[in-house]
Amino acid sequence: MEDLPASVGVDLFAEHGKNPRARTDVLVTAGGYETRLGFSDPVFDESVVVASSFEENQITELRLYPIEHRHSKRPANRRVLRPALAPQARATLGRLQIQSRPFGTEITIENDVGVNRGPFKHGSIETEGTIMEKQQLFERTEFLARLAAVKDEMARRGIDVLLISEPPNMNYLTGYDAYSYYVPQFVIVSLNGDEPIWIGRFMDRVSAVMTTYLADDNVRSYPDKYVQSATFSAYDVMAETVKQIGGEKARIGAEMGGYYYSARAHSDLMRALPHAEFVDADLLVNWIRVVKSPAEIALMRQAGKIADAMMERAIDTIAPGVRECDVAAAVYHQMAAGTPEFGGAYMCSPPFLCVGERAVAPHAAWTDKPLPASTIINLELFGNRHRYQVNLSRSISLGKPTPAYQNLSEIMVEALNAALDSVRPGRTCAEVEGVFRQSLARHGLEKEARLGYSIGLGYPPGAVERTASLRKGDETVLKSGMCFHMMPGLWLDDVGITITQSFAVADDGHEPLSSIPRKLFVK
């Protein structure tokens, strides 16, 4: 941007090519408010840069600068800024006043070459002349069915507005997917709204436009001055959004037990919305998404195939002298590569590689030590496909295992298979766990930790849904479409073993979500 005249205060810029259908969405912010303008000017057949200048709460000017293609080896769809070559082609779009107008305001601009440029609404997004289509995994009708179920539960609990801060739940209701959960962000559901509202950091708004089904007016953001600031709180902006939808005196549900709803978030929201009543709505959405649709089950199957490929790669890599970190590297490579048919996504947590004396710890990390000639390795990893995650654990013996350890592995597999065979709709989580517990008891063994937990959509820090658990006392009734990781790991004083199975509850029993043999692997 160094070629722009010094008199123009540049806030942003965007490019588009000759495609007459192309639109460049330009984010313009001023005074804490923002709008997004779409530009596809037939006057210029070359790419343009849009520059804005604003003072206080007013956007004062937008300018179009022609781009001239430099004759070089760079691709034809790349343009560089050369305003000095064609100053006569500059067009001032007039003075644009948006004082205190909230996001989504339609604006009509008439430029000085007589082209009416509005009303503008953001839609498709373009980079380097290529329109990026919406990246939605599910039909709009499925999202609306999920929303209806959430609203029904809100109404049952007397909740007017629901603030969703957990990334899996945001994804479930809108499709939103981006690495942005380290800053404040919400999906806001109102009983009176046709769609949820996404609100987050301004630079992540593009991801929201791309990945969600939401209408333009329901994708909002806050300027960067609210990020990691001791002076400004992004929750003030979010509170203003709640007020705009009539929630100033509402009964507001928040995910108070979630990973991403902080004490500061709660205190700032209560300060900004003093007349609202806040109630705990933690796990409201989690329990609704516990039963997966056929489209979700299809993604879980793919995640399971990725998990299988990762485990096979790890077992192939494990050998005496190989560093633990190199095994982890192979796991990560396969995680992203996935299978020949489809690629993978990042895991919700690091893989757990517990070697030797650390095999008694379930969640230990790898080291850079070389593997010895004789040892036990417990490995847990996670195949992820479009954020749907399947967990998988296996124990590997380098060298011949002791007879006692071999016998222990057979006992664990026997109990695992018995519990899996007991799975069917109508049974409770506690009943399935009881089958496993009774099988172990015949050998004088007992597992203190839960046998398993529901899985599905996952973001860091973990892949568990925090709902149903396969354990004593959990009377959750199994339904077709639920997914679990059955984790019969056993960690004793001197040894640990983990041979697990993720599965979906099916109409006639269970469907394994991974196919790698349930056994102790010996190398």
Image (tube, grey):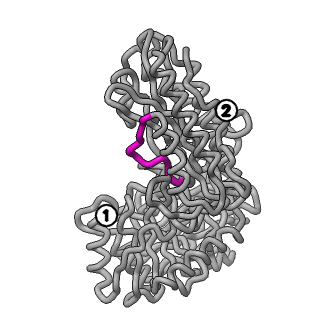
Nearer to us in this view, 403 or 279: 403
Report if residue 3 is visible in the image: no
Picture coordinates of residue 268, whole percent (x, y) = 28, 73
Q: How many marks do you count on the picture?
A: 2
Indicate the secondary structure of the residue bearing disc 1: loop
Indicate the secondary structure of the residue bearing disc 2: loop
Tell me the amino acid under the disc marked 2.
Lys
The reply to whether callout 2 and callout 1 are in contact (CB within 8 Å) is no
Picture coordinates of residue 223, whole percent (x, y) = 40, 66
Picture coordinates of residue 514, whole percent (x, y) = 65, 39
Q: Is residue 436 left or right of residue 226?
A: right
Q: Is residue 21 left or right of residue 289?
A: right
Report the magenta residues as a range. Answer: 444-454
Eye-nearest disc, 2 or 1:
1
Residue placed at 23% from the left, 67% from the top? Answer: 231
Q: Which residue is mark 2?
A: 73
Picture quadrant where residue 343 is located: top right
Residue placed at 46% from the left, 28% from the top? Answer: 378
The C terminus, quarter of image: top right
Q: Residues within 10 Å of mark 2 (few under 14, many from 20)?
A: few
Q: Which residue is mark 1?
A: 262
Q: Residues within 10 Å of mark 1 (few under 14, many from 20)?
A: some
Nearer to us in this view, 4 or 302: 302
Magenta span: predominant SS is: loop
Nearer to us in this view, 162 or 515: 515
Picture coordinates of residue 150, whole percent (x, y) = 55, 75
Picture quadrant where residue 418 is located: top right
Residue placed at 59% from the left, 50% from the top? Answer: 388
Report if residue 156 is visible in the image: yes
Give the spatial CA distance, label 2 vs label 1. 51 Å
Q: Is residue 473 above or below residue 327?
A: below
